[in-house]
Image (cartoon, coloured by chain):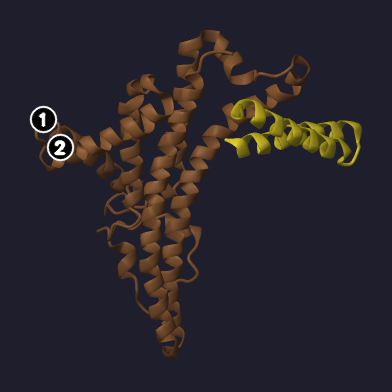
Chain colours: A brown, B yellow
Amino acid sequence: MVTGQTTVLAADVPFPPTVEDFFLPSIVPWGGDGVWFTKITLLLWASVAILIIFFLVSYRKPQLVPGKKQWLAESVYGFVRNNIAVEMIGREGVRFAPYLTTLFSFILLMNLWGIIPFAQISPNSHIAFPAVLAVISWVLFIYVGFRKHGIGYLKVALVPPAPWFILPILVPIEFFSNFIVRPFSLAIRLFANMFAGHMLLLVFTLGGFAMINQNLWLAPVSVLSWLMTIALTFLDFAIIVLQAYIFTVLTASYVQGSLVEGH
Amino acid sequence: MAISYLVAGMVVWGGIGWLVDQWLGTKGIAMGIGAVVGGAAGVYLIARRLGA
């Protein structure tokens, strides 16, 4: 049921791929038009279910000498806690480690669908998903800031250490940069990387078919194109991990910015 | 972070300059001044916030 795209490798391959290729058909037979249950929906639910079940099972009976599952879960949590939360925020960062771990593993898994056979598209290539995650991070660091400083958070966030006569120029920049640009840059960075990754793989896969269908003499080039697809899949894997890491690190860094002591 | 300040500076003050252009009917002079001032302020902010 999820092999929809990959089986359509017949004579007339649509090329070049377009944005339309990201909007997949419904995968349930009932409901007709406008049905929202697509592969993307399935992958989202699967991601949530996999993460919940994985962490519940891994931590159900924790052993002193961890088994494989417990080792993996502890490694992920330990990595985010020590190398992101504490590294970026300091000792207070431990409080945020559970959320940051959830965020990191969720984004990582959602991104990974982009190169997992038969899934082969990441839900994060639809901007709605990164956008919601970015809004959560945005609300989080603003909430943490007001919680810590009260109304004085506005001063911490908006008023840089500078002579008073330059402040009228600087404060609007701080406001724009800290409260408006941040959620957009978070969302767009993740979305664009996942979108481009999927698009690249589509171009090289479908391009191979387009060429071989045009002229059999182009077959070697087609094979080259498919080899490129494999190479790019590895590149995409690196980007997938990197983007999950960056999103989490930036969220931690914004929280850290909300927690700094006033000047 | 640094790039965000630089871009934000030019966008905010360039944008305000553009509004002034619309208001006064000048063709891009205020926007140009705004973008330069904003860029400079962005550099200054980076130095203050992220530098020493």
Name the residue carrying label 2: A70
Q: Distance between the residues labelled 1 and 2?
A: 7 Å
Tell me residue A90's x, y (percent): 40, 23
Label 1 secondary element? loop
Name the residue carrying label 1: A62
A57 or A20, which is in the foreground? A57
Q: How many marks?
A: 2
Question: What is the three-letter code of the residue carrying label 2?
Answer: Gln
Q: Which residue in the rendered view is the most extreme toward the front? A: B52
**Contact (Cβ within 8 Å) of mark 1 with mark 2:** yes
Would residue A13 be found to the left or right of residue A51 on screen? Answer: right
Question: What is the three-letter code of the residue carrying label 1?
Answer: Pro
Identify the residue at image location x=14%, y=35%: A58
Chain at tag 1: A
Q: Is residue A124 visible?
A: yes
Label 2 secondary element? helix
Tell me residue A142's x, y (percent): 50, 21
Please say if A90 is above or below A74.
Answer: above
Image quadrant where one finds the N terminus of chain A: bottom left
Would residue A94 be found to the left or right of residue B40 on screen? Answer: left
Q: Residues within 10 Å of mark 2 (few under 14, many from 20)?
A: many
Chain at tag 2: A
Q: Can residue A139 be seen in this view?
A: no
A250 or A214, which is in the foreground? A250
Q: Residue A82 carries which label?
A: none
